[in-house]
Amino acid sequence: MTTDTTGTAARDGEPRRGGPADSPFVRACRREEGPHTPVWFMRQAGRSLPEYREIRANVGMLESCRRPDLVAEITLQPVRRHRVDAAILFSDIVVPVAAAGIELDIVAGTGPVVAEPVRTLDDVERIRPITVEDVSYVDEAVRLLVAELGDTPLIGFAGAPFTLASYLVEGGPSRTHAKTKALMYGDPQLWHALCTRLAEVTVAFLRVQADAGVSAVQLFDSWAGALSESDYRRYVLPHSAKVLAGLADAGIPRIHFGVGTAELLGAMGEAGADVVGVDWRTPLDVATRRIGADKAVQGNLDPAVLLAPWPVVEAEVRRIVAEGRAAPGHVFNLGHGVLPETDPDVLTRVVALVHEVSAR
Ligand code: CP3
């Protein structure tokens, strides 16, 4: 038995009930009826919000992720402003890797940059296992947030082994993932050693968040769409499956997301997700046929549509809510993160529109 933060006891592996566990978001993840289609946005906390730009003006990205007071404030900003159905912890996928001993920075406008890219087994062994002490700021921030959010669920997250490995092997963002694939095809043993270690760190990191009270977790395999289905199944799926299985007894929904993954949707579901994230390239009714009726879907408005005139946005939102009805559960989201140039008032209007057109 573990005591969850709503005060009710949940048996290991059994769904939590009451409070955020009965929210429209968690209900949709579990494929249960709710009052409306829930909506949140990847990157809802961030540069589209003036209050975010202000709070981050003199604080580096990694430093802000390590200060529980800032993490809590930044996480809450979009919840207050847009009335989204879920908060997502403000952090980054490289935070646990840094905690595991890899020297890196998050450079504004570029993304994660790794000082010494991973090339050898010795490099892999530099990635130490992590415990709650290594990420105590995350534990503390989640507890602060769960207390503050009341019935609004908090989503925890981590990067999946392939996407993390890409940053570690390339040394930074890459369009082709060429060095990553060269290692994967050229030295499968080293590749699997690296992904095994990353999966262990990721399970530990998600476990910290689950123990502190998050209501769901999202595993971001943002760059998995660079792979064919057969390579995905051979080199990546077993490691992501280990991460998702490692969280099974937490009793919270697991969302699995990637970009450009039309051909991988079935496999990503098989990795052990309750909800599969879909980008804008695949309509949700088509996606749900690929994923299967035993999983909910999340998505899939093109973030660039938010830059278009409102009638265009409105028509797209209505289409996606309608197509989402083909799935046994639908969480409305974008197909990828909010673009920094997005007008935040448009996001607020989208939330209200999704709630209105999906009201049951
Ligand atoms: O609101 C939220 O979604 C929570 C916050 C969040 C961030 N990063 C904050 C952030 C989440 C969920 C992430 C995950 C993340 N980080 C992913 C997976 C999601 C995705 O976008 O595919 C990836 C690939 C990263 C790596 C990363 N970190 C990139 C590509 C960038 C963008 C670089 C840039 O500046 O445009 C970052 C930096 C980052 N992470 C920012 C934020 C708000 C911007 C830094 C800043 O504001 O100074």
Image (cartoon, rainbow, N blue to C red):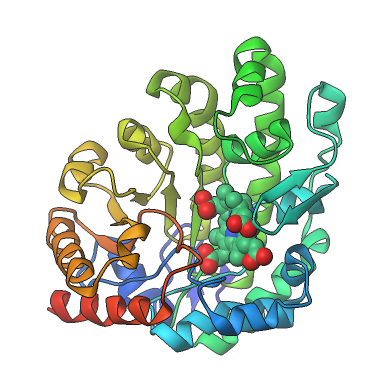
Tell how many labels.
0
Where is residue 80? Give x, y as percent. 47, 88
Answer left or right for 61 relative to 188.
Answer: right
Q: Nearer the viewer, residue 68 or 112?
A: 112
Where is residue 87? Give x, y as percent. 49, 74
Answer left or right for 252 relative to 196.
Answer: left
Say which residue appears at 55% left-offset and 34% top-offset: 175
Say which residue appears at 69% left-offset and 15% top-offset: 189
Residue 64 vertical placement versus 205 (above, below): below
Answer left or right for 85 relative to 106.
Answer: left
Where is residue 360? Give x, y as percent. 12, 78
Where is residue 124? Give x, y as percent. 80, 30
Q: Is residue 181 visible?
A: yes
Residue 108 vertical placement versus 258 (above, below): below
Residue 79 vertical placement versus 165 (above, below): below
Residue 232 vertical placement versus 165 (above, below): above
Q: Is residue 209 visible?
A: no
* Quadrant of residue 357 within the rendered picture: bottom left
Q: Nearer the viewer, residue 292 or 165?
A: 165
* Quadrant of residue 131 within the rendered picture: bottom right
Viewport quadrant of the N terminus: bottom right
Q: Quadrant of ligand 1?
A: bottom right
Which residue is most to the front? 309
Say which residue appears at 21% left-offset and 45% top-offset: 288
Q: Nearer the viewer, residue 12 or 307?
A: 307
